[in-house]
Amino acid sequence: MKKPITEIINSYFPSLTNSEQKVATFVLNNLENVIFYSVTDLADEAGVGETTVLRFCRKIGLKGYQEFKLTIAQNLSEEKKDKNGSDSGNIIQSIANNSVYAIENTASMISEEDLNKAIELLQGAKSIHIFGVGSSGITAVDAKSRLLRIGIQASAITDSHLQAMSAATLSDQDVVIALSISGSTRDTIESVKIAKDNGAKIIAITYYSRSPITQFADVVLVGGAKESPLEGGSLTAKISQLFVVDLLCTGMALIQKDRSLEMKNKTAKAVVSKIY
């Protein structure tokens, strides 16, 4: 087992500044909750700035906030395994329950006002660009497919360099859908900032309503499931993302029912020969 994060923090505690000690004290008292916090959440709870949290992570020998959360998650996982031995129970029912809960939780967190505002932005957009990397990149491609089926052209960009270049060409007539469960994905945030600086409207789909990516968003749709760093790309998180994408696509389809139905028929016919 790796050296416990509590011992690491305690060993560095005397050398920390007063502000950094506030972070350390809060973390030591709330380990199981902190792994689900964005850097903004932890900063607020500890009563310090985000830069103090990042400085604290480096002070205790870690490269950044995500490595900090990953280390805590690994420690907690190993401790749980040592106490309980191998996991048991009905895996099928457990995963099913988690998936249902994720959708219900997402539905309760999204306001109808925010959803309608996002749909309105998409309806008036000259072009739509969907940014996502890693697991969120897969959702971005699926979102492009969903939009195409109702006759709406959109680009799904999952490469960070292409995201940045694409963002630099946008204007106030364009909309970016930014996907990031953590809301702290560096590549996506950097691209979103470029797009925002060029006037593009930003729709952020993230689990954390107060995370770095939301600073640049015109609309925040809270989607995704709470996941620890050891669960990156989990099925429940992806289901929640897809649920939000479905809300957007369905909302747009309802506004232009006839055209959407026509496009659904056309796109279905275009691929019918691909199936035996």
Image: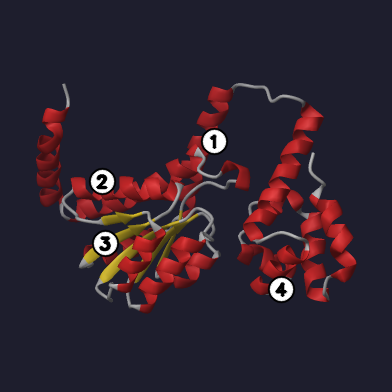
Q: Residue at x 58, y 42 (%)?
A: 231
Number of residues whose C-alpha sits closer than 10 Å to that of mark 2, classed few (under 14), some (14–19) or many (20 or more):
some
The residue that label 3 is drawn on is 128
Q: Say which quarter of the image contains residue 121.
A: bottom left
Amino acid bearing label 1? Asn
Q: Contact (CB < 8 A) between labels 3 and 4?
A: no
Q: Is residue 258 left or right of residue 92?
A: left
The residue that label 1 is drawn on is 98
Q: Secondary structure at mark 4?
A: loop
Amino acid bearing label 3? Ile
Q: CA distance from mark 4 to mark 2?
A: 43 Å
Q: CA distance from mark 3 to mark 4?
A: 37 Å
The residue that label 4 is drawn on is 48
Amino acid bearing label 4? Val
The residue that label 2 is drawn on is 145
Q: Earlier in the sequence, mark 3 or mark 4?
A: 4
